[in-house]
Image (spheres, helix red, strand yellow):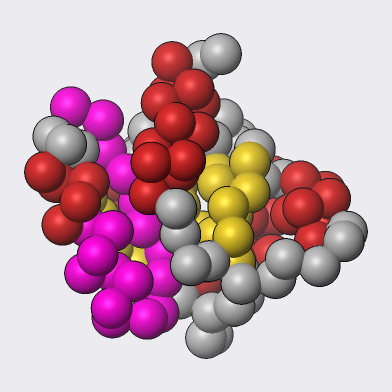
Amino acid sequence: MPKILIVEDNELNIDMLSRRLKKREFEVVIAEDGRQACELAKSESPDLILMDMHLPVMDGWEATRQIKSDEQTGGIPIIALTADAMPGDREKAIDAGCDDYETKPIAFKQLLTKMEQLLSGD
């Protein structure tokens, strides 16, 4: 069962994502800020990270850079979750180290497809 780290500070989004992922047999771990995300990426070794980019304490951009630059966590795929849908925002997420990008409000089927592709190594 793949382990997913959800990094999100909005309780409604946490609830929606975690319930829907658990229903599909994913194990779910929650971080509510970027620093906690970096710590849990190391201690929990998730198979994939869903990273909100606008977070307290440390934003998702910096958390992604730290996770990707660490030898222990650098190989974990990260999907950026953000309300930023302006031209260039996808590139900004990819440049920070994200493997993919999904805008909010989240289209769950589309997100699931991206997750499955990254988890299968395609």
Is residue 28 toward the left or the right of residue 84 in the image?
Answer: left
| The residue stretch that appears in magenta | 1-18
Is residue 10 toward the left or the right of residue 21 in the image?
Answer: right
Is residue 89 toward the left or the right of residue 113 in the image?
Answer: right
In which quadrant is the N terminus drawn?
top left
Residue 48 spot, x, y in % from top left: 42, 38
Q: Is residue 95 magenta?
A: no
Residue at image x 50%, y 26%?
118
Image: 106 above or below 86 = above
Residue at image x 11%, y 43%?
23
Residue 42 in sight from this viewpoint? no
Image: 8 above or below 64 = below
In which quadrant is the C terminus drawn?
top right
Q: Residue furthest bottom?
A: 56
74 and 116: which is toward the camera:
116
Image: 52 above or below 109 = below
Total count of labels: 0
